[in-house]
Amino acid sequence: MLEELRRRNYAESTIHIYIHTVEHFSRHFHRSPDQLGPEQIRQYQAALFTRWNLAQNTVTQRLAALRFFFCTGVEARLERLPKRRIRRRFCTCRRC
């Protein structure tokens, strides 16, 4: 995640917040973030508003961090890898 954030030229403060958010999300459920899904994100969002009384903009930023984490995960990166090009051999005769 850190490498991808830097590759996309995110600000250092944004990188820090995104990493902190994923760590906090993981600690909140006492599980690895790879084992969590959409239902836990909804519960986390509700907790951000009710338990920690965070402002709307802060919650939006935290959700953006989680969206980034889950959308640029290993599976997403594998899907974006360039596929091997198949070389087609063209006929060298002039009849074709």
Image (cartoon, helix red, strand yellow):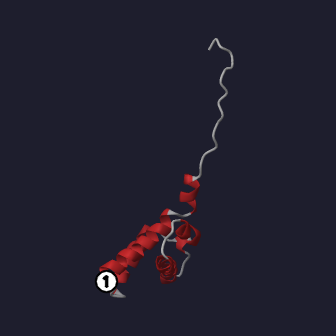
Mark 1, secondary structure of its residue: loop
- Judge by depth and name the residue closer to the eye, 2 or 26: 2
Position in image of residue 28 (x %, y %): 47, 83
Is 54 on the left-hand or right-hand side of 69? Answer: left
- Asked where in the image residue 87 lies, by quadrant, the reply is top right
92 over 69 or under it: above or below: above
Q: Tell me where residue 46 sits by quadrant.
A: bottom left
Q: Quadrant of the C terminus?
A: top right
Question: Left or right of 61: which side holds 19?
Answer: right
In the image: residue 51, left or right of residue 65: left
Q: Crowdedness of circle 1 by 10 Å Cα count: few (<14), some, many (20+)?
A: few
Q: Looking at the image, how many numbered discs can be counted on the residues?
A: 1
Residue bearing mark 1: 55
Residue 67, compared with residue 80, is above or below; it is below
Residue 79 visible in the picture: yes
Q: For the point 49% across and 66% down, which residue is it? A: 70
Residue that protrudes farthest toward the bottom in the picture = 52
66 shown above or below 94: below
The quarter of the picture where residue 62 lies is bottom left
The amino acid pointed to by label 1 is Ala
